[in-house]
Amino acid sequence: MFIEFLSYPFVQRAILVGSLVAVCAALLGVSLVLKRYSMIGDGLSHVGFAAMSIGVAFNKAPLFVAIPVVIIAAFLLLRLSENGKIKGDAAIAMISSSSIAVAMIVVSLQGGMNTDIYDFMFGSILAVNKSEVIAAIVMAAVIIPLYIICYNKIFSITFDEAFSKATGIKTNFYNTLLALLTAVTVVVGMRLIGTLLISSLIIFPCLTAMRVFKSYKKVVICSAILAILGVVIGISASCVLSIPAGSSIVVTNLLMFIIFTIIGKIK
Amino acid sequence: MNLLSVKNLSVMYDNLLAAENISFDVAEGDYICIVGENGSGKSTVLKGILGLVPLKSGTVEYIYPVSKTDIGYLPQQTSLQKDFPASVYEVVLSGCLNADKTKWFYNKNDKQTALKNMEKLEILELKNKSYRDLSGGQQQRVLLARALCSAKKLIMLDEPVTGLDPMVSDKMYQIISEINKKTGISVVMVSHDVESAVKYADKILHLDTKMQFFGTTSDYLSSDIGRGFVGGRI
């Protein structure tokens, strides 16, 4: 039955697009989790939700409204937590809830929930269209090579920002790059698995890999593999069991986390 | 020959003037300890020199041919690192990265430098261990090895023995002193441990927001401020 599902073009598309987005999210996620910025993905996805709702309201292409707005939000969040006036987690909670509030006002003025809005919340990975496939491929083609080139510098900055900055690495540049790439990944990703679930693609693979592996390189490689496994198993399970794909991917990630935790304890 | 010249440095920290009008030079082969009470601006001055906190006024000048990429830095450990999945080798190697802006990957030279410094600090056998599984003393040695990878002329250390037990601290001081004597790398160290400071360093910078003393250790020990600060403790 599973093989039969795999022959459907829409399932193939979903697995391709899902894997690309998940790998990007997982790679960036390693740095975000280790720098204690896990909630940024969550905050940004809520901002993206607001931007997309407004985009729909004004009949603009939601993706093109959301990307610049979320990039600006990413800069703001990083600046806020750096200045230390408002603590990072509080800043994110504030921006998240305000965004949802704005989004719901726009939605209600538009005449209430419709399928577009529902899809923004919970994703529609099995219904991706051609432009979304292209967006995901372009994004992965930029982010993955860029990540590999900057890998050593990203490690240095993630492990010890003070040392990196003191010895002459342009830490602001790399932090900005990280924020920018995270923003793009979140916006493209939320279209697939939804606003409410996208942050799991960022945090789960890294946390799971960390249970078992103890070097940075192994954690990064394992995170990328887990990200793909999560999408493939999650989508397959969703087809076989007729459950929502986005939720199925998140639950798969949760199960992998539990298995890795047990392996880590036994080792 | 001077490597670094600090002139009239003032640094703000949380809207307070943490250090005011500090001037001193670091010469080749120097071993300088920055001492003072808690909150006297020791660490802040070091961070100001390294560009980690903005300066209110004053200048920090690396004297040609020394540049910012010739220095090593041993920061105080952060809470983030306690749970960080990284092997000892990965951490030490990352010290080789800063030399060139366009350098993305490590070459053979870097790997040799990292291994050599690990050997020097007797942590070679920990190479593939995870940083988070090490003892406090071992972690400090790893960070010192990383600092040595980037230090060609000068190494700056911020409270390198905090949280270490006395035996391990002594060993750490000996290692640092050996590096200074054998390789000629200048050392600037922030320390709250004034006894060890006067034992190992050849120059003392005493701060209490303002500069109280800068000169050789023997001059410091015979000065009023030095006698007052050290006397009560030995």
Image (cartoon, coloured by chain):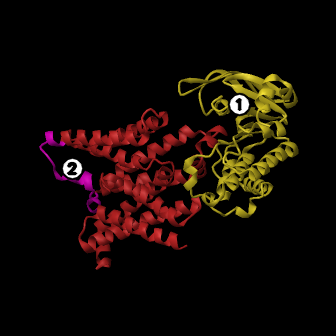
Color used for chain B?
yellow
The quarter of the picture where residue B17 lies is top right
Residue position marked by numbered label 2 in the rendering: A117
At mark 1, the secondary structure is loop
Furthest toward the left, the residue is A111
Front residue (pair B232, A169): B232
Q: Is residue A206 left or right of residue A105?
A: right
Q: Amino acid at mark 1?
A: Gly
Q: Is residue B3 visible?
A: no
* Residue B182 image point, x, y percent: 87, 46
Task: Categorize mark 2 by other alpha carbons within 10 Å: few (<14), some (14-19), many (20+).
Answer: some
Q: Is residue A232 visible?
A: yes
Q: Is residue A17 left or right of residue A215?
A: left
* Residue A172 image point, x, y percent: 54, 38
Figure check: B220 above or below A205: above
Q: Which residues are magenta?
A: A107-128
Residue position marked by numbered label 1 in the rendering: B36
Furthest toward the bottom, the residue is A1
For the residues labelled 2 and 1, the Cα–Cα distance comes to 61 Å
Mark 1 — on which chain does it sit? Answer: B
* Residue A75 image point, x, y percent: 43, 37
- Foreground mark, 2 or 1? 1
